[in-house]
């Protein structure tokens, strides 16, 4: 099956919102995307791959103009188009059942392939919830995890703010075209995210914030991430949809508990009852990721430091982990934390942080009973 | 193996704090408890069943007097001695690894054989925690569950208060002799518990509130109960010991979550992380008990209404459940809640409450997928 990395061929389908499955069917039916674009209207109607409205779109006179506009946008500074199948398309997102076929990106494209954690929650969060989100995001970003959220007010905003404070930075996945900012009050935050992190969308330029786009967008938030953390959410809320898609995608779900008298805690409690991990701190999230995912933790290629941000991570982490770090003491035979404490004379916190980074980079794997071994 | 129901033979061993295991060994070694009491000091020393101090106790001159005092106490109004193996000794408590061999009871002995739920928590509970404990206890007592707790200040006190408000009433398991009340400030509450429920102890008359008796006492709180509910507890606390013994005894553990900034919620969060069920309401506890225990719910004989309290339950429950109740519609083929709703025209809440009572009395059993069938 094609990897769909040929951007110009992909844009017409993207602009008419083909799903990944429909795109695969079209390629299979017509032989290639280029052949599909050369087919005529009745060929498309007979193929019954997509509905009549999508066929109409492919033969709309304005299509050429929109393709040119899109390609031109992709040439702008800090503006990129990333097709599914291209090297820059994040593996985690490609692994879900219905990935987007094209991502518009403002900011750092390389950030997309770093390990990410989604943090989402209520727009009507309490002051305490806001502080919690910011603290968790800051801590986890400092562990090298990018913080993915949806640029909404409340918890999302706090998650982005906290992510920007750490080395992992943050990704905003929005439900509009990237030429718009919603909500408008987050314009300054969006600007900082583009400068230091990334803002991404699967929706074409000009797309307005339509209600039914938000649940669809949520699968990208969870799909980019090794897990989704929910901090304050009502029982019927978008955050619970994101948690549900995370589960469907086989990713971890974490929830912060609250008072049983706080309506914004009920969504989190429902998730915990359904099997989400209760977490009280960023350290809890980290420990769960390491213990649950263990050796199955998705292996991400270390970024090459092509952006300022990449270099920053390179400096902070690669040095400590490989040259003077704990990896010196980890061989192919499993070793426990106790022994690492004695050998390295480092504080427990530092050892655990380094172990996480080494698992993320695929250099070691966690064994049972809190032991680790080198795998390459 | 003997049932150890012969009270006078048992008292000397009880007064010297034999464990159930030691008692079994003594009977096995000497042939019977009576023979054991007739054995001389060197026989006991050679038998190596118990330590020298316990042997000394059995040959202490003051033993006769203490046996007489204990027997006399058991003759008092609303004062009973219940030996392991007697019909009045609760089956749930007999089912634990190290049951007490004799219980002193003030109040209603028959209450001990009703289904019980333990509710425990911090002495330093918040106002909200106190209200939560009282609400849960009242609701669950109204479902026919007796509320077991430890007569401490804070959550325990609120649990007893709530239990007294419902039909299931309450049992206080104390760590002193029953001729004492600890803490003294709960004297009025203890009086009401004796009037309407029961206060019990495995410790001989005159036993002071010694620190190391409390953890030992906790195994009786959980051991009497189908499950233990923890409401506000610090990480290192007696409540967590009770939850631990509940798990060791194969009983359910429930915990109420709270803000991650509330130190009194940390113990509950730790329990949830370790597998305890998160509950937000009494209804949650009820549903978990029914769904988890299902047909394995311990079958308790319905009380015969010999006490005022027993008659009250008889009137309230037996009528509605068997004559005009939901049991009419439940046959040996499983039936679902939907069908019961249509057939009975009763509110869901009423149906669920009756189903619980019928499971408790062993007349129906829960099947998978929310269905029930008659079993006798």
Image: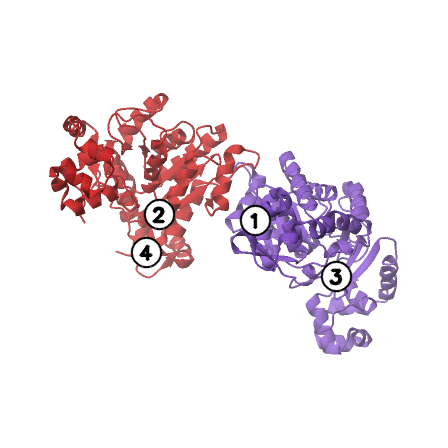
Chain colours: A purple, B red
Residue A44 image position (x, y, % from top left): 75, 75
Label 1 to label 2, Cα distance in Å?
Answer: 53 Å
Disc 1 or disc 4, which is closer to the eye?
1
Residue A181 image position (x, y, % from top left): 79, 47
Label 4 sits on residue: B330
Q: Element at badge 3?
A: loop
Label 3 sits on residue: A89
Label 1 sits on residue: A339
Label 2 to label 4, Cα distance in Å?
Answer: 13 Å
Q: Element at badge 1?
A: helix
Read off the chain for label 2. Answer: B
**In the rendered structure, which disc, 1 or 3, sits on the residue that comes first in sequence?**
3
Q: Element at badge 4?
A: loop
Read off the chain for label 4. Answer: B
Residue occupying image coordinates x 11% and y 38%: B38
Disc 3 or disc 2, which is closer to the eye?
3
Residue A107 image position (x, y, % from top left): 81, 51
Q: Which mark is residue B356?
A: 2
Label 2 environment density (alpha carbons within 10 Å; few <14, some 14–19, many ≥20)? many
Q: Element at badge 2?
A: helix
Q: Are marks 3 and 4 in contact (CB under 8 Å)?
A: no
**Residue B127 relative to residue A214: left or right:** left
**In the rendered structure, which disc, 2 or 4, sits on the residue that comes first in sequence?**
4
Label 3 to label 4, Cα distance in Å?
Answer: 58 Å
Placement of B318 over or under B160, stated as above or below: below
Check the picture and name the quadrant holding the C terminus of chain A.
Answer: bottom right
**Residue A188 relative to residue A280: left or right:** right
């Amino acid at each position: 099956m094609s990897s769909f990395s040929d951007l110009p061929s992909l844009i017409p389908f993207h602009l008419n919102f083909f799903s990944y499955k429909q795109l695969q069917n079209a390629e299979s039916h017509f032989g290639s995307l280029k052949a599909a674009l050369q087919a005529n209207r009745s060929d498309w109607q007979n193929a019954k791959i997509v509905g009549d409205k999508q066929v109409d779109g492919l033969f709309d006179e304005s299509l050429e103009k929109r393709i040119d506009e899109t390609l031109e946008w992709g040439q702008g500074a800090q503006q990129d188009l990333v097709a599914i199948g291209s090297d820059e398309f994040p593996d985690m997102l490609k692994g879900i059942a219905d990935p987007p076929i094209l991502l518009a990106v403002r900011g750092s494209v390389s950030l997309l392939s770093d390990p990410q954690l989604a943090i989402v929650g209520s727009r009507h969060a309490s002051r305490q919830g806001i502080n919690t989100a910011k603290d968790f995001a800051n801590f986890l970003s400092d562990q090298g995890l990018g913080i993915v959220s949806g640029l909404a007010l409340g918890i999302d905003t706090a998650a982005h703010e906290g992510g920007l404070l750490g080395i992992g930075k943050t990704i905003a996945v929005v439900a509009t075209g990237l030429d718009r900012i919603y909500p408008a009050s987050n314009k300054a935050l969006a600007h900082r995210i583009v400068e230091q992190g990334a803002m991404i969308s699967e929706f074409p330029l000009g797309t307005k914030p339509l209600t039914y786009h938000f649940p669809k967008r949520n699968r990208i938030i969870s799909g980019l991430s090794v897990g989704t953390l929910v901090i304050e959410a009502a029982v019927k809320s978008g955050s619970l949809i994101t948690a549900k898609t995370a589960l469907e995608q086989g990713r971890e779900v974490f929830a912060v508990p609250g008072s049983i008298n706080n309506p914004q805690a009920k969504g989190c409690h429902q998730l915990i009852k359904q099997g989400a991990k209760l977490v009280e701190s960023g350290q809890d999230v980290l420990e769960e990721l390491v213990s649950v995912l263990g050796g199955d933790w998705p292996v991400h290629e270390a970024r090459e430091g092509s952006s300022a941000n990449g270099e920053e991570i390179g400096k902070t982490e690669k040095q400590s982990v490989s040259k003077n770090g704990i990896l010196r003491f980890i061989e192919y035979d499993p070793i426990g934390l106790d022994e690492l404490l004695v050998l390295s004379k480092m504080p427990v916190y530092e050892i655990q942080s380094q172990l996480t980074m080494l698992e993320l980079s695929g250099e070691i794997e966690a064994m049972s009973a809190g032991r680790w071994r080198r795998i390459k």
